Image (cartoon, rainbow, N blue to C red):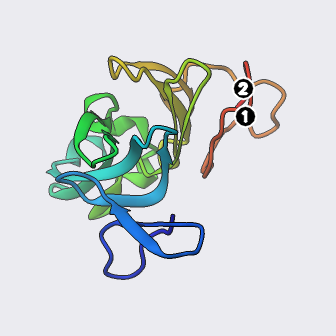
Amino acid sequence: LMGAGPGQTAFQLLNPLGEQTGSLACVGRPTYFHDLLIAPGGDAWILCSETRVMDLTAVGGLAAANVIATVVQHLSPAGALLWEWNAFDHFEITDIPLTDRVGVNVDFTHVNAIDFDADSNLLLSFRTPNEVTTVDRATGAVIWRFGGLAGQFTILNDPSGLFERQHGVRWAGTGRI
């Protein structure tokens, strides 16, 4: 698997010899080239994005900000869309620090990583809201949020008291990420 280069719109699927055997892209949305999962059966969980023009003046931003949020798609081995989750449906713009919502382009959730937990739910790392979130794969409901302004846990014994700007997340066993 190779990420996309300039002008590319899909991940390139490669065989062990490095020959391209196919490609993988989001269905109907821009592909977000940070991470993806390909399950043993060939299903893929791919990161996508959606941009909405929003008036953020009530929360310290601009009247016509381009707000970019994460969309996760589950694709069949043939590339058909099976399921979709959209951060716009689960997060609030005030979940990100004020300094991150003041520009023309607001990278609202900036997803960096995706994994499965022990229950096969999605584990997502969102850089801008400074959090790791678990999403139920069956219902799309947010199970818990760690870090950030909307976090549900207290961080102990950390001098900064913050969890911020992480770029990756992997399930490391029961109770560990």
Q: Crowdedness of circle 2 by 10 Å Cα count: few (<14), some, many (20+)?
A: some
Task: Determine whether 4 is above or below 122 in the image.
Answer: below
In this rendering, position of residue 160 left or right of residue 113: right
x and y percentages locating residue 115 in the rendered image: 55, 38
Please tell me which residue lies in front, 159 or 164: 164
Task: Determine whether 154 is above or below 115 in the image.
Answer: above
Determine whether label 1 and label 2 are within 8 Å by CB: yes
In the rendering, which numbered label is found on residue 49?
none
Please tell me which residue lies in front, 12 or 42: 42
In primary-sequence order, the first of circles 1 and 2 is 2
In this rendering, position of residue 71 left or right of residue 66: right
In the rendering, which numbered label is found on residue 161?
1
Residue found 32% across the figure and 33% down from its top: 92
User: Helix, strand or loop at disc 2?
Assistant: loop
Residue type at mark 2 is: Ile
Residue type at mark 1 is: Gly
Residue indicated by mark 2: 155
In this rendering, position of residue 18 left or right of residue 79: right
Task: Determine whether 78 is above or below 18 in the image.
Answer: above
**Distance CA(mark 1)–CA(mark 2):** 6 Å
Residue 82 location, quadrant: top left
